[in-house]
Amino acid sequence: MPSVLVIGYDPHKLPGIDGDALRAVLDKEPARFGEHGIDAAITLVVFDDTAEPAIVASLTERPWDVVVIGGGIRRTEALFPLFEQTVNLVHRHAPQAAIAFDTSGGDSVEAALRRLRDAMNPLPASPALPASPALPALPALSAAEIITDRLRLRKAHDSDSDRDGLIELQTDPRVRLYLGGPRPRSAVEQRLDAIGTANATSNPGTFVIADRMTDRLVGTLVLDRRSASLPGHVTAEGEELELTYLLRRSAWGAGLAFEAATAALRTAAAELPDQPVLVVTQTANERSLALAARLGFRRVSTFRAHDAEQALAVANLHTFKAS
């Protein structure tokens, strides 16, 4: 599924603008993206010290295919330094992403589609060789809930408990030791305010890991496609399934990551055709590599990304089928 990040200016901070009306338009954009089969997120900033950490946190959240920079940033003369800063941050933190520009806040979908069409339909190498048609979206795990002995893999709720748990996962220095470090709390809070806590896990294959008895959030798990624009693949086309997870420190050491991962992989194996599944982590993350090996993943290569050596491990999905 293509992914798009929209970076815009807080409409309530733009002079001479009906902030409520423009915000209402922006709030409709995620649904419009969804109608085109695009996974989208919106980050709204203001021109102060919070802008850069908020933009960086959003850019590094996942490998975006397109970043749309809003007209409020680009067309307001007083915000031109912010526009320059935003473009440079995209180049630095999301070099794989195409950059698009909208004009009104209500045409970010059209702006993103221009760049996505360019990516999927490149110019032919010669008049005799037309561009290949775009590939259909690869299937994803459709289950919305998975139950184990101790856990419930579910979608996030619009609750203070889930919100607090998601913020802790993104801001705890030890949890994010091998993931580029903790994100600024203000940026994480702003992101959840913009999308709503429940939408943090709206994508197929994305779950909150909750205690089955108390329903307390103990982590997150994602079984989704690894973007072909990123390094670390075992097929020429890329887009293999990739398993990632995070656990709160209070949940470490109890075998919960193994239990959650096993359940998700078994569910996917029962639903999807056999295919490679990837685990990518820093080679310094010995605990994660040990868990991958215990699950049945075999390490096949290393590569460098994000200023660190990364290990690539792979397993065949149907090896996780319940016997």
Image (cartoon, grey):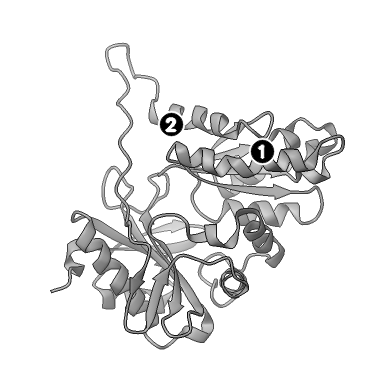
Type of amino acid under label 2: Ala
Circle 2 crowding by C-alpha within 10 Å: few under 14, some 14–19, many from 20: some
Q: Position of residue 47 (x, y in %)?
A: 80, 47
Q: Position of residue 193 (x, y in %)?
A: 66, 58
Q: Which residue is label 2 attached to?
A: 119
Q: Is residue 203 left or right of residue 83?
A: left
What kind of element bears circle 1? helix
Looking at this rendering, what residue extends furthest in the top direction?
127
Farthest bottom residue in view = 254
Q: CA distance from mark 2 to mark 1?
A: 27 Å
**What's the mark number on residue 50?**
none
On the question of residue 202 being in view, the answer is yes
Please identify the quadrant where the N terminus is shown. top left
Residue closest to the eye, 303 or 167:
167
Label 1: few (<14), some (14–19) or many (≥20) C-alpha neighbours in 10 Å? some
Identify the residue at image location x=51%, y=39%. 33
Q: Earlier in the sequence, mark 2 or mark 1?
A: 1
Q: Residue 74: image x %, image y %?
A: 73, 33
Image quarter where the C terminus lies is: bottom left
Task: Mark 2 vs mark 1: give the one in front.
Answer: 1
> 42 or 212, which is in the foreground?
212
Question: Residue 78: which quarter of the image?
Answer: top right
Q: Which numbered tag is attached to residue 25?
A: 1
Image point (29%, 72%), residue name = 263
Rendered view: 148 above or below 274 = below
Identity of the residue drawn at 42% across and 88% down:
253
Give the x, y percent position of residue 63.
48, 50
The quadrant where residue 95 appears: top right
Depicted 60 relative to depicted 267: above or below = above
Badge 1 amino acid: Val
- Left-right relation of 193 to 224: right
- Residue name at image x 51 percent, y 58 percent: 306
